Amino acid sequence: MYAGEVYSWRQLNSKVMKQSLFAKRKFSGYFKYGFLAAIAYIIPVIYFFYDRKYENFYFIYIGTILFMAAILFYALKVLSRPVEKEQAITMLMHEFAVIIMGIAFCILFLIALDFYFSGDIFNTRPMSDTIKDAPGAMEFHKPAGLLLRLIGIMVLTNFGGGSFIAIVITFGGKKNQTEDKAA
């Protein structure tokens, strides 16, 4: 849409919806790449749930690195779209939508894994059943305490890492940044 062009309301509405952040085809992309990022995160976390030792906490951070790799893949895909010629801020909004969708899927997967491996997560049980060889600061007798801590770590690290990747790739890789107009 250029300044001198005249559009009917129907043409204008269809052009805006095709470029909208919540268009159906883009939302399905957010869903697909958010799901892939969550799967990439959850694969190492499954091993942590299978063998719950304090020494295996690094698997959670390996999952975060894999989540960041999936966001990197999506950011490069958005960056290479020649047809849309989107503004950098619009590209960044698409990437943040994938990050938020991925985090939502990760939360659901963490809850499902905790129920699968722990059974009833709200009952008190011995510390050795919750996590083995944990230091005194990590002692909790309900698996729900571990779940809340894992969700907190996941949200902070995945959002922080995904945001870093999205910002660096969007502003570092976009060509013709001088052509962006004010929003």
Image (cartoon, rainbow, N blue to C red):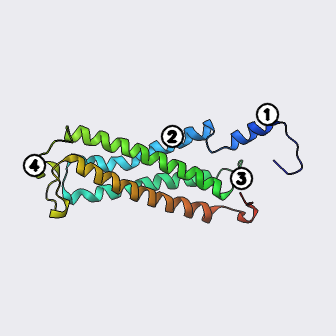
Mark number for residue 31? 2
Which residue bears the numbered disc 4? 126
Amino acid type at image mark 3 = Lys
Q: Position of residue 10 (x, y in %)?
A: 79, 33
Relative image position of residue 125 (x, y in whole percent): 12, 46
The reply, left or right, for residue 65 in relation to residue 74 is left
Spatial CA span between label 3 and label 2: 22 Å
| Label pair 3/2, CB-CB below 8 angstroms | no
For label 4, count other residues whose C-alpha is less than 10 Å away and answer few (under 14), some (14-19) or many (20+).
few
At 11% from the left and 51% from the top, the residue drawn is 128
CA gap between label 1 and label 2 equals: 28 Å
Based on the displayed image, in which of its 4 quarters is residue 6 positioned? top right
**Which residue is at 30% across, 49% downward?**
45
Question: How far apart, in angstroms, are the residues tagged by discs 4 and 3?
Answer: 58 Å
Q: Earlier in the sequence, mark 1 or mark 2?
A: 1
- Whichever of labels 3 and 2 marks the residue nearer the N terminus, that label is 2
* Residue 4 x %, y %: 89, 49
Cα separation between marks 1 and 4: 65 Å
